[in-house]
Image (cartoon, rainbow, N blue to C red):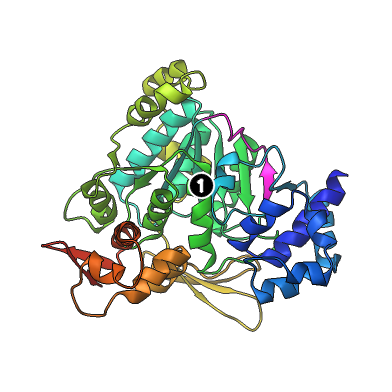
């Protein structure tokens, strides 16, 4: 019955797509995906709040692709965790666009009972950011706090490494299929994460990454957690998108302060200016959540970690995590799906491999795609090149409170800037 149920969850996921708000409307009415599968076209047509395109997809009853995915997952020991599965993180069910299924490799920690904290940051990490991220993640892992990240180059990889080395549990949320190692440099780290926690994705196993995947992935990182720590990131970076997702979801946001003239610190410093929590050490997180998670936090483990932390460089080398930033530029090739040029300290090497895919640049288009529909709508109402007030946008029939919330998110993402006198301007 489990496999049969998963078959219909996968079928529904393929029909609904990624980050669909329509899915919430469907599961409000139907507990079992099979109940959706067996709906007649006339019944589907009567579903409210569902687009004509999705109704058309739901009329497609072919199970061929879903069955193929199911068989592949069984053969490769990939768990399929459907929305109603008891192991599905309850915190994700509160999202307006929750994943239909999670593909999981490894052992997913009990997200529903332990303290989970997201840690994300720039790929272009500084020595300060690297050492700080490692120390905080190492101590959180030792304290039995589950650290969630995106397994990206830079800060994300360091945080996963620190957590593992402390003996803690970590989860990596991918912006691609679970059978695709991305970035390729983190293949060894990915295997360590699977051994000491789990790698999860809402994308089918062989889905390739593309720039639009990652902003959508970020909502799961923040959605799984009670709080998110931002360790370095320029304005408008992927880390700041995760922060905006966390704020919109009602999660706590913490930021590591940095030098005021360092571009890597622009994002965290702006967040702190906007009123988020300052984090200087793991104790700041522990103290913040002590009341709620006192019974699951290991204070003895935290104390031990402070006395005997494994050196950062030694741990990074052990798990194959790059200690410097590698800039990547990807060029399509006729001979292979992807051709990669790696630029490292002036040396350029062409590489061709099946699982490498375009790197995501921190550009405005990707940021915009990661915003929720309401924030996108408000951004579209903002005039170009002219200072405006929140009331001017609210005059279009939107609650001024929603406008102010959206403007906060847009400012964090670097799409608008605040001016003296309560004014804003599109950047």
Displayed quadrant of residue 286: top left
Decide if residue 268 is on the left or right side of residue 328. Answer: left
Residue ID at (84%, 55%)? 71
Q: Is residue 232 magenta?
A: no
- Determine the residue located farthest toward the bottom in the rendered image: 334
Secondary structure type for disc 1: helix
Q: Can I make out residue 180 in this image?
A: no
Dot 1, how many residues are within 10 Å of its Cα: few (below 14), some (14-19), or many (20+)?
many
Residue 337 vertical placement versus 219 (above, below): below
x%, y% of residue 148? Answer: 50, 42
Provide the residue span drawn in magenta.
101-114
Residue at image position (37%, 22%) is: 306
In the shown orientation, is residue 309 left or right of residue 79? left
Question: 54 or 43: which is nearer to us?
Answer: 43
Can residue 395 be seen? Answer: yes
Q: Quadrant of the C terminus?
A: bottom left
Q: Residue placed at 68% from the left, 64% from the top?
A: 16
Residue closest to the far left:
421
Q: Nearer the viewer, residue 292 or 148?
A: 292
Residue 113 in the image: above or below residue 226: above
Residue closer to the observer: 86 or 396: 396
Residue 347 in picture, x, y percent from top left? 41, 69
Q: Quadrant of residue 106?
A: top right
From this view, report whether residue 321 is shown above or below residue 310: below
On the image, the x and y values in percent for residue 326 come to 42, 61
Residue underneath mark 1? 223
Image spot of residue 99 (x, y percent): 62, 54
Quadrant of the drawing holding the N terminus: top right
On screen, residue 312 versus residue 386, left or right, reads right
């Amino acid at each position: 019955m489990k496999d049969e149920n998963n078959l219909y969850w996968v079928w529904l996921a393929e029909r609904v797509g990624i980050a669909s708000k329509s899915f919430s409307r469907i599961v409000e009415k139907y507990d079992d995906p099979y109940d959706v599968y067996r709906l007649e076209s006339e019944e589907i047509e009567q579903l409210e709040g569902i687009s004509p395109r999705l109704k058309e997809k739901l009329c497609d009853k072919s199970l061929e692709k879903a069955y193929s995915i199911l068989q592949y997952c069984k053969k490769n020991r990939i768990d399929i965790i459907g929305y109603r599965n008891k192991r599905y993180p309850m915190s994700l069910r509160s999202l307006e666009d929750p994943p239909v299924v999670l593909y999981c490799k490894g052992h997913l920690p009990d997200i529903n009972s332990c303290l989970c904290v997201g840690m994300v940051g720039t790929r272009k990490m500084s020595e300060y950011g690297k050492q700080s991220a490692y120390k905080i993640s190492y101590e959180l892992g030792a304290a039995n706090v589950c650290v969630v990240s995106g397994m990206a180059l830079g800060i994300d990889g360091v945080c996963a490494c620190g957590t593992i080395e402390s003996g803690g549990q970590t989860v990596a949320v991918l912006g691609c299929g679970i059978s695709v190692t991305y970035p390729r440099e983190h293949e060894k780290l990915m295997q360590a994460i699977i051994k000491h926690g789990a790698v999860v994705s809402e994308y089918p196993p062989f889905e390739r990454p593309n720039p639009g995947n990652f902003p959508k992935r970020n909502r799961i990182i923040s959605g799984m957690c009670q709080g998110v720590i931002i360790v370095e990131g320029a304005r408008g970076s992927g880390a700041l998108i995760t922060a905006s997702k966390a704020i919109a979801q009602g999660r706590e946001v913490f930021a590591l302060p940095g030098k005021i003239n360092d571009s890597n610190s622009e994002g965290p410093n702006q967040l702190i200016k906007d009123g988020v929590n300052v984090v200087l050490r793991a104790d700041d997180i522990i103290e913040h959540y002590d009341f709620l998670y006192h019974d699951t936090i290991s204070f003895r483990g935290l104390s031990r970690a402070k006395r005997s932390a494994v050196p950062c460089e030694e741990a990074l080398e052990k798990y194959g995590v790059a200690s410097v930033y590698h800039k990547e530029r990807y060029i399509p090739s006729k001979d292979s799906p992807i051709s990669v040029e790696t630029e490292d300290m002036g040396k350029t090497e062409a590489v061709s491999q099946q699982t490498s895919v375009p790197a995501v640049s921190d550009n405005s288009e990707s940021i915009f795609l990661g915003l929720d529909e309401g924030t996108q709508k408000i951004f579209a109402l903002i005039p170009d090149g002219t200072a405006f007030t929140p009331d001017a946008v609210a005059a279009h029939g939107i609650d001024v409170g929603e406008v102010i919330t959206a403007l906060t998110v847009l400012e964090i993402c670097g799409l608008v800037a605040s001016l003296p006198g309560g004014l804003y301007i599109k950047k």
